[in-house]
């Protein structure tokens, strides 16, 4: 994990947009150790920087794809061509772990990862989020918000999405094939969360899941 993050820091040193680690890597980075395998590096960026992000990756020689449902992705060749979905997938041609199966539509592929662990900085999934001058907004429900200084944390100059926000996103995917990893991340995070972080997550889970989410009782 640390090797991939270090390479990401170097790679994005000259980028002109804000980014932070999210997903399972953010949980491990918060805890300070690797607790499980991670199949991809997830980075959080903001909607206003979407075109900058796409342009930066294309200029770096990476291929850029946008999710279009049912495991399919559409390749983007310039910033004007996108469907405005929340995530994009980027990798260089040299990445053999990212496998593309052509479909009946031009530039649309069925996408799979051959392995369940990313071992080098050769794949990034960007997830776009909303902010204003003071707040970070949960993408599925903008009534759930967090002050920017609590939403995006910093460790040794590396920014990462706070664990309570990462877990809130993960809380909506406990019926998917990655549910085991999401539950693992919650269990590993729990001893490290402050009382304030736990209270925020508990309240947010109540808003998203009508107070019947399985994690609420543990908080």
Image: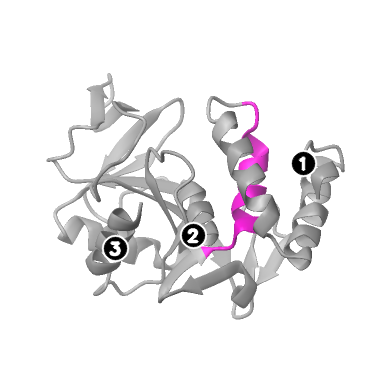
For mark 3, what is the residue?
Answer: 6
* Overall secondary structure of the magenta section: helix
Query: Horizontally, is 113 left or right of 218 in the view?
Result: left
Q: Depth check: give the residue in front, 203 or 117.
A: 117
CA distance for labels 3 and 2: 14 Å
Q: Characterize the local packing of mark 1: few (<14), some (14-19) or many (20 or more) Cα atoms within 10 angstroms.
A: some
CA distance for labels 1 and 3: 32 Å
For mark 2, what is the residue?
Answer: 32
Query: Horizontally, is 128 left or right of 116 in the view?
Result: right
Check the image and report above or below for 55 versus 25. below
Query: Horizontally, is 69 left or right of 99 in the view?
Result: right
Who comes first in sequence, dot 3 or dot 2? 3
Q: Characterize the local packing of mark 3: few (<14), some (14-19) or many (20 or more) Cα atoms within 10 angstroms.
A: few
Q: Residue furthest bottom?
A: 133
Residue 100 percent across, percent down from the top left: 24, 27
The range drawn in magenta is: 161-175
For mark 1, what is the residue?
Answer: 215
Q: Secondary structure at mark 2?
A: loop
Q: Secondary structure at mark 1?
A: loop
Who comes first in sequence, dot 2 or dot 1? 2
């Amino acid at each position: 994990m640390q090797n991939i993050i270090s390479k990401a820091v170097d790679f994005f040193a000259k980028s002109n947009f804000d980014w932070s680690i999210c997903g399972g890597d953010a949980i491990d980075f918060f805890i300070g150790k690797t607790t499980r395998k991670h199949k991809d590096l997830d980075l959080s960026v903001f909607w206003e920087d979407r075109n900058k992000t796409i342009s930066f990756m294309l200029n770096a020689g990476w291929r850029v794809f946008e999710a279009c449902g049912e495991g399919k992705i559409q390749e983007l060749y310039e910033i004007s061509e996108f469907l405005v979905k929340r995530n994009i997938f980027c990798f260089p041609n040299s990445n053999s772990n990212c496998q593309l199966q052509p479909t009946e539509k031009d530039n649309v592929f069925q996408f799979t990862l051959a392995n369940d662990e990313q071992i080098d900085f050769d794949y990034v999934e960007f997830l776009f989020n909303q902010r204003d001058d003071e707040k970070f907004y949960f993408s599925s429900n903008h009534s759930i918000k967090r002050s920017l200084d609590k939403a995006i944390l910093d460790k040794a100059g590396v920014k990462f999405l706070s664990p309570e926000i990462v877990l809130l996103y993960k809380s909506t995917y406990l019926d998917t094939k990655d549910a085991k990893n999401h539950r693992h991340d919650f269990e590993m995070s729990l001893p490290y969360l402050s009382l304030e972080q736990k209270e925020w997550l508990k309240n947010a889970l109540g808003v998203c899941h009508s107070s019947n989410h399985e994690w609420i009782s543990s908080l």
